Image: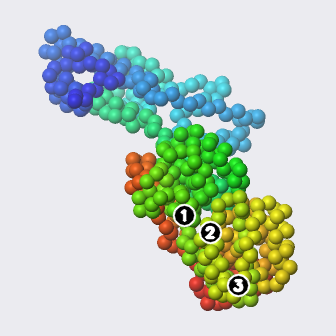
Amino acid sequence: MRRRADLLLPACGEKVGMRGRFRQAQNRGNAPSPAALRAATSPRAAGRGAVGRGDFITLIGGAAATWPLAVRAQQPAMPVIGFLHIGTADAYTDSALAAFRRGLQQAGYVEAGTRRRGDRVKRRADLLLPACGEKVGMRGPLRLAQNRGNAPSPAALRATTSPRAAGRGAMHRRSFITMLGGAAATWPLVVRAQQAERIRRVGVLVLDTENAPNNKETLARLRENLAQLGWIEGRNVRLDVRFADGDPDRLRPSAVELVGLAPEVIFVQSAPATIALQQLTQTIPIVFVNVGDPVGQGIVKSIARPDGNITGFTNLFASVAGKCVNLLKDAVPAVARLALIFNPRVYVFEDYLAEIESAAAARAVRTIRTPVSQPAEIERAVDAFAAEPNGALYPVPPPLSYPNVQLVLKLAVERKLPTIFPARNFARDGGLIGYGPNNDELIRGASSYVDRILRGTKVGDLPVQFPTKFDLVINLKTAKALGLEMPHDLLVLADEVIE
C-alpha cells in the first residue's frame, strides 16, 4: 500500500513538474529532502515546463493556508454551545462563564473557539500547525490572511520569504519549503488522531435510590475504575443509569427502559435487579455485584463457567451470616432476642436466614423473622419488638430501601436497640456494627469484567467470583447513644472505629 501526501493537496508533484526523487518522497508520505526540493525547482526543471521557484513557493503557501479548511471539512460536525447571561460583561459574568467552561471540559468537550455578540470571528490556521506565522517569521500581510482563513497573495508570500524577512530571523526560502513539505506529509495522520473516538454504551441498574450514599459511592468507584482502564465517560464510553428507588415494582420498567437502549454491557447491583434483567435479555452481557447466592437463585448455572449472558462478583457466603451473630453477641452479651428484618417483596436468601438462626441458637439467642416493606409496618414492628428487653435488630440482605434503612436506624437509637448490618457502610450511617465484604474490591473486579467484555471477552470465560476481603466497622458514637461499652478486644479487631 502506498501512503500519499495528497489527502489535502492531490497530486501536487504532477502540477509543479517534480522530478523523480521529490515525487517518490511525496508518495511515500515522507518529507522531501532539501536536495530533492532544489532539484524540483531548478532552472533545468523549469525549462521542461515546470513551475518556476517563485511561483512554486506561492503555490505551496496558498495550499498551506487552505489546508486547515480541508481538515475542518474532514472532521465530524462540531457542536455549537451558546452562553446567555442576564447581566453585563463584568467580572461576575466572566466567573460564571469560566465555571461553565470547566464543567464542559470535565464532561469531555474541548473548546475550539468563542464568539461574543458584537465580536468579529477570528479563524486561525494553527489548528494543526500552531503559530506557524511566528515560526517562519511571517510579516503582517501573511499573518492577517492566515488569521482570516484565506489563501495569502503571491505578494504576501514573497514578502514572507524575502532576504529582508530572513534578516529579521525568518527562515530561508529553501528551509521554509522543506518545512511545508514535511508538514504536508504528517498532517493526514494528525487529522485521523483528531477524529472522535467511538462511544461505547454501558447500562447500570440499581434497586435502591439515587441519593443513597452507598449507591453514590458505588457509581463513583465504577467511573473511577473504568477511567483507569481507559474508558473515559463522555469521551469513549457513556453510562446510562437507572434507579428503582427501592421499589420492586419499579424494577421491571427500569430494566425494560435500559435494555431498550441496547447497551453493550450492563452493570447491575442486587439480585432482584439482576433477575429483572435476566427475564428481558439473554444476549446483552450482564455483570452483577452483591447478589448473594447466584446459583441458588438461578442467576447462573455454573460458578466456574457461566453458560449464559451473566457473570460477576457476589458478596455473600452463608457463613458470614453466622459471623455477624457472633460479633453482635460478643459486643453486647446481654442480647437474647434478634429481629431479622427483611422486605418480603424481594427474594431473601433462605440459606442465609437458616445460617443466622443456627448461629443464634448456639449462642442462646432467639430469632424472630420480621417481614416489613412500608414505613408504617417498620414502626409497628420495631415498637412491638422493643416492648421486651435484651433485643437487637439484624436487617438482612437484600437491604431495605435507603429511606427505610434510615428509619430503622432512627428507631433503633430511640428504642435502645443494638443493630448489626452485613455491610460496613451501614455502620457509617449510624448502625452499631457493620461487617461484610469490601465493596471497593467487588466494584473493582466488576469494572474489570466490564472492560474485558467491551474489548471482546466472552461472558463464559469470566467465572463468578467471591469476596476475599471483609471489613469490620464499629460506631462508638452509636454505642454511646445506646449506653453501651464496647469490649476492647473487639475494638482491636475492627478495621474502622467511628468515634
Give the amino acid at mark 2: Glu
Residue depth check, mark 3 versus mark 1: number of the one nearer the observer: 1
Q: Which residue is mark 3?
A: 365
Judge whether 434 appears above or below 123 on screen.
Answer: below
Query: The residue tagged with tag 2: helix, strand or loop?
Result: helix
Residue 386, image quadrant: bottom right
Near mark 3 (Cα within 10 A), the count class, few <14, some 14-19 or many ≥20, is: many
Q: Which mark is residue 350?
A: 2
Quadrant, the N terminus: top left
Residue at 85 percent across and 68 percent down: it is 380
Nearer the observer: mark 2 or 3; the answer is 2
The residue type indicated by label 3 comes to Val
Report the side of 329 relative to 414 (left or right). left
Towards the viewer: 338 or 74: 338
Q: Earlier in the sequence, mark 2 or mark 3?
A: 2
Proximity of marks 2 and 3: CB atoms separated by less than 8 Å: no
